[in-house]
Image (cartoon, rainbow, N blue to C red):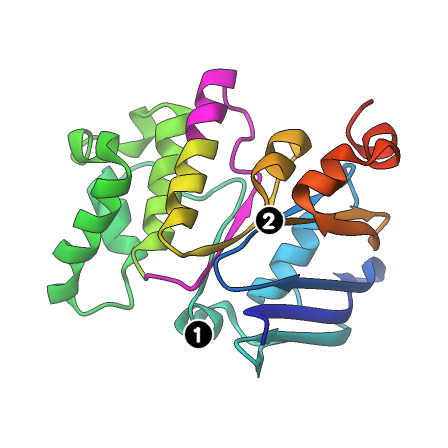
């Protein structure tokens, strides 16, 4: 059974239909990269999976349970967490306070142990745990955002453009962190404009264009496909 499976998914905003009969699968422990041009519907797909957009048609099953149309609150309780591209941290709070907010469903007694897990993954956050997040670099903020999602020990982590706006050095650092997190057994579904880097680390990838599936397959196979390279990877 796939960890996550979307079939025949159609969704949009108001009168505008963005996704048309999209399918996608994530298995246990995988990194799955979702790539495509701007406006392809990648972020809309993420939001539909997480309950921020209500699908008009189709099915979304998580661990075999239908979650299409469920609220984000209930989806989080099933074991799925989402890190949006923007507005993903509380800038007026410290790093540690952000982690506490991420663990809002936990009993207070469980918070210290969960924070220790996050600090083990992101040692920089331990050093800066009392620093206000608004004073942190973009890379550190992204660590806080991902760490906050990890507080609930999800089975699947959705990442929307984790490297957006970061310097090349910080991009490498964030991708290394994602690989490290995945090595713990956590499955990751990632939307990423840095398509080559995303596919290089992905178990599998999906290419969306105009709200529809175009190509899918193993990450390295998509990287090596000259047609995918010409149309979607810039050469």
Element at badge 2?
loop
Numbered range of the magenta stretch = 153-174
Question: What numbered label is drawn on residue 16?
Answer: none
x, y percentage for residue 92? 29, 37
**Residue 2 occupies which quadrant of the picture?**
bottom right
Is residue 220 covered in magenta?
Answer: no
Identify the secondary structure beneath mark 1.
helix
Residue 41 visible in this rendered orientation of the protein: no
In space, the residues marked 2 and 1 are separated at their CA atoms by: 23 Å
Circles 2 and 1 in contact, beta carbons < 8 Å: no
Q: Position of residue 151 (x, y in %)?
A: 29, 56
Q: In front: 172, or 14?
A: 172
Q: Residue at x 48, y 58 (%)?
A: 29
- Of residues 80 and 24, which is closer to you in this image? 24
Which of these two is toward me, 12 or 158?
158
Q: Residue at x 84, y 60 (%)?
A: 17
Residue density around tag 2, few if under 14, some if 14–19, many if 20 or more, within 10 Å? some
Q: Earlier in the sequence, mark 2 or mark 1?
A: 1
- How packed is label 1: few (under 14 Cα within 10 Å), some, or many (20 or more)? some
Position above or below: 27 against 122: below
Quarter of the view holding residue 186: bottom left
Q: Is residue 177 left or right of residue 219?
A: left
Q: Is residue 34 shown above or below 1?
A: above
Q: Is residue 215 above or below residue 7?
A: above
Residue at x 39%, y 62% (from the top left corner): 154
State the residue position of label 2. Answer: 203
Q: Nearer the viewer, mark 2 or mark 1?
A: 2
Q: Tell me the number on the disc at residue 78.
A: 1
């Amino acid at each position: 059974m796939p960890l996550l499976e979307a079939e025949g998914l159609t969704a949009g905003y108001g009168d505008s239909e963005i996704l048309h009969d999209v399918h996608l699968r994530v298995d246990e422990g995988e990194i799955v990269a979702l790539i495509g041009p701007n406006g392809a519907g990648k972020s809309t797909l993420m939001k539909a999976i997480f309950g921020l957009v209500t699908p008009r048609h189709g099915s979304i099953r998580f661990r075999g349970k239908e979650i299409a149309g469920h609220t984000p609150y209930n989806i989080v309780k099933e074991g799925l967490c989402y890190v949006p591209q923007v507005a993903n941290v509380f800038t007026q709070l410290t790093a540690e306070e952000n982690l506490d907010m991420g663990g809002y469903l936990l009993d207070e007694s469980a918070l210290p142990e969960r924070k220790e897990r996050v600090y083990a993954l992101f040692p920089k956050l331990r050093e800066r745990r009392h620093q206000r997040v608004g004073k942190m670099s973009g890379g550190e903020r992204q660590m806080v955002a991902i760490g906050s999602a990890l507080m609930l020990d999800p089975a699947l982590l959705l990442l929307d453009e984790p490297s957006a706006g970061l310097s090349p050095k910080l991009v490498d650092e964030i991708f290394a962190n994602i690989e490290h997190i995945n090595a713990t057994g956590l499955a990751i579904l990632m939307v990423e404009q840095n398509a080559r880097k995303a596919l290089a680390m992905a178990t599998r990838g999906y290419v969306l264009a105009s709200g529809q599936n175009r190509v899918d397959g193993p990450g390295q196979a998509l990287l090596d496909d000259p047609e995918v390279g010409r149309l979607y990877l810039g050469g």
